[in-house]
């Protein structure tokens, strides 16, 4: 489990296609201000822009390798990722940690897109996202959503679109600071909401 609070950024060095999927190679993560130093370990689970992956190996200079299955390539935008792109990085939640965002499983539900970006008066930005029709049920006013692994609060949902207000600190710490209209984003609906919907449906 994760919280949607990004700890650092990692640059993509290579996406190497293989017979049954691909190998993703990242540079050593650059941590946010005030974050204690840490090194990924083989087998450790990390959320990379909202997608939970296991560290397959550690190379020279702290490069980190991940194996991507066909399922992961089909459900995410990793299939088209290019060298130089940065990914949001978050370590798995410990039971004793504070839950500053919301419960995030790291399982990408759908891929959406940024359709508008506006500057706000406080130095932040207002983002408008468009989601596939099958994701619309998880979009509700003041509800939580994970966008590329970032815990955000939904504002003014309207059918397949919703807005979020992103503060300057989040722009500095995450990939949203360099995001542009048209960029694809990973979407994950609220984990608790999914269980409530399933249990209510069974009754």
Image (cartoon, rainbow, N blue to C red):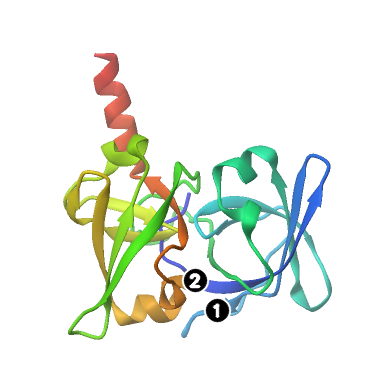
Q: Are marks 2 and 1 in contact (CB under 8 Å)?
A: yes
Q: How many marks?
A: 2
Residue toward you, 16 or 190: 16
Determine the image quadrant of residue 197: top left
Please tell me in which quadrant of the rendered image residue 126 appears: bottom left
Question: x and y percent of residue 36 in the render?
Answer: 54, 79
For the residue pair 89 and 43, the one nearer the viewer reads as: 89
Please determine whether, in this image, residue 91 is positioned above or below residue 175: above
What is the crowding at mark 1: few (fewer than 14 residues within 10 Å), some, or many (at least 20)? some
User: Taking the image as drawn, is residue 100 in sight?
Assistant: no
Element at label 1: strand
Q: CA distance from mark 2 to mark 1?
A: 6 Å
Residue at image x 71%, y 62%? 41
Q: Closer to the N terminus: mark 2 or mark 1?
A: 2
Instruction: Locate residue 179, reporting x and y percent.
Output: 44, 72
Left or right: residue 58 compared with residue 79: right
Question: Relative to residue 4, is residue 92 drawn left or right?
Answer: right
> Which residue occupies 64% across, 52% down?
79
**Label 2: element kind:** loop
Q: Is residue 78 above or below residue 14?
A: above
Residue 55: give x, y in percent of width and height. 71, 56
Residue 4 position, x and y percent, is: 41, 59
Q: Residue furthest top?
A: 203
Mark 2 neighbour density, 10 Å: few (under 14) some (14–19) many (20 or more): some
Q: Nearer the viewer, residue 154 or 63?
A: 154
For label 1, the residue is 31
Residue drawn at (32%, 57%), measured in percent from left and top?
129
Q: Quadrant of the C terminus?
A: top left
- Left or right: where 177 falls relative to 126: right
Going 46% across and 63% down the picture, which residue do you hit?
Answer: 183
- Residue ID for mark 2: 7
């Amino acid at each position: 489990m994760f919280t949607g609070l990004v700890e650092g950024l990692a640059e993509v060095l290579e996406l190497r296609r293989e017979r049954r999927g691909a190998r993703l190679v990242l540079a050593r993560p650059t941590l946010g201000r005030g974050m204690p130093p840490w090194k990924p370990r083989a087998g450790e689970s990390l959320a990379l822009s909202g997608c939970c992956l296991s560290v397959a190996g550690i190379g020279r200079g702290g490069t980190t390798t991940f194996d991507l299955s066909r399922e992961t390539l089909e459900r995410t935008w990793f299939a088209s990722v290019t060298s130089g792109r940065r990914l949001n990085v978050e370590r798995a939640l410990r039971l004793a940690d504070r839950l500053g965002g919301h419960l995030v499983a790291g399982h990408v539900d759908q891929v959406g897109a940024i359709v508008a970006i506006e500057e706000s008066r406080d130095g932040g930005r207002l983002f408008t996202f468009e989601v596939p029709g099958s994701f619309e049920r998880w979009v509700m006013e003041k509800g939580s959503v994970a966008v590329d692994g970032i815990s955000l609060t939904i504002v003014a949902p309207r059918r397949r679109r919703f807005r979020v207000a992103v503060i300057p600190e989040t722009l500095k710490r995450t990939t949203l600071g360099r995001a542009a209209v048209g960029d694809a984003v990973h979407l994950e609906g609220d984990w608790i909401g999914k269980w409530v919907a399933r249990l209510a449906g069974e009754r």
